[in-house]
Image (cartoon, rainbow, N blue to C red):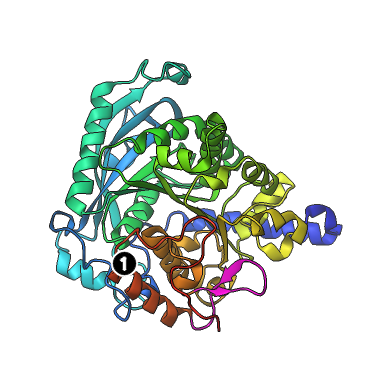
Amino acid sequence: MSSADLCPAELGSTRLAAAAALLLAAALAGCGNSLMPTPVGFDRAGADPFAQTAEPDRGATVRLFLATNRSVRKDSGGPSTYFGNDRADELRLGTLDVRIGDDGLGWPELRELSRRDGRDGTPPMRIAAIDDFGPVWTSAAELRTGSAEVGIEAAVRDRFAAAVERQLQDSGLDELFVFVHGFNTDIEGNAAVGASLFHYLGRRGALVQFEWPSRNSVWSYQADKAAAAASVRTFRHLLARLGTGNRVRKVHVIAHSAGAPIAVAAIHELRLMRSADPAPAVREGLRLGRLVLVAPDMDLDEFRDCVADGTTEVPERTTIYVSSRDKALDFSAWMAGFARLGQPLAELTPGRVEFLEDDANVDIVDVAAAEERMGSWLGHSYFHEDPQVSTDVLLTLISGAHPLDRGLQRDGKRKVYAFGTTYPERAREAARRIEAGAPGDTAPPPGGTPATKVPEP
């Protein structure tokens, strides 16, 4: 349903609901950062995500890698305020250390706490340190096509690459996870989410947090969307370089909300730049693995055009999470006047989503049932707030397994997957099975069938 289908009274009610959602989001923004609730698949009855965590990573501090086009604050009072909310003409690389809990929390206690059933709101998380290696370029003009090395600071690039290689070697997994945040965020909140995801990934591989300059204001939606659009080229160059490391085997991308069009547009441009090459060759060149789009705040027709140009043929597989309980995307659709990719399929005509259902390399996951049981009122950050949804997101990133192999159920005759009433038990079994195998080796080929046939209920 579009705004044109609503009568004046209904339209006014929708706008009031959208405004209320924004005000609630603003109120919740100051509630602090903490470790994400225990995913149901990794609680005490499920898999132990830390069984394979390497010794150097067994501690209360999580090391993330940072790539940002945020400005540097000259009056910074500490690591959490080192970067500002304005755009910069440069891409800076470095590391970001996130502390979980107070200084007295050790690894055994953290490991137990992380698997505690129903844990919510603790322990707190904060940025402990930022190591800014410096800029790898200082303006977009210095990365002109055909002169990509002009203006690049080799020392910064090489230091970053060496640090990533050491992390991959120490962790025992040669895979990168790239997290692209959404609207109305700051670096400390994003770091808490990125560190939580990496923590429950068993700290295997390495996680790169791409920090584009959100204004961190509920009233700056249009400014954030403009900043996201202006960050596409920067992210494209970053993505093209991440896969060139000697040890990097795969690069997986998870993008949330307004960060989703950054990831999609960057891959779209990379596909068009090599349009004469078959998609598998482009994928191999980028070493691109899974693309996960959570609550994507992206125009549906724009995404359709990207699909038509072969964008979703490049990743191994693309997973899109949608919800009918996402009030933030309701507001976004009202602002834009057009449907968003992350909105519920029930509100999108079958003809408009047919291109997704016919795309053999895209899975659509409807989280509405899980959100109804366990979700928040706003319903936009379910990928780290809802223990059921976070389980499936983590299993997707870890293995790329087919949705049925992750404990989901098929929703009717469409190629849409949902969270059934027995999902917690199915998720725990799936997590144990996936964790017992080799991470990253269970993904079916594009357009293929599940590695394990799980009967539908």
Magenta-colored span: 408-422
In this rendering, the answer to whether 284 lies above or below 396 is above
Front-lying residue, 416 or 260: 416
Q: Name which quarter of the figure residue 90 lies in.
A: top left
* Residue 434 relative to residue 309: left or right: left
* Residue 131 relative to residue 455: left or right: left
The residue positioned farthest toward the right in the image shown: 7
Q: Position of residue 444 (x, y in %)?
A: 45, 61
Quarter placement of the C terminus: bottom right
SS class, disc 1: loop
Q: Position of residue 329 (x, y in %)?
A: 63, 55
* Residue located beneath label 1 in the image: 122
Q: Is residue 387 visible?
A: yes
Q: Position of residue 182 (x, y in %)?
A: 50, 47
In this rendering, the answer to whether 363 lies above or below 79 is below
Based on the picture, tell me whether residue 421 belongs to the magenta stretch. Answer: yes
Q: Position of residue 326 (x, y in %)?
A: 60, 61
In this rendering, the answer to whether 58 lies above or below 291 is below
Question: Which residue is pictured at 36% across the width and 47% down the height?
Answer: 250
The overriding secondary structure of the stretch rendered in magenta is loop
Q: Name which quarter of the figure residue 19 lies in.
A: bottom right
Question: Which residue is pictured at 48% across the width and 58% down the height?
Answer: 28
- Amino acid at pointer 1: Thr
Front-lying residue, 160 or 279: 279
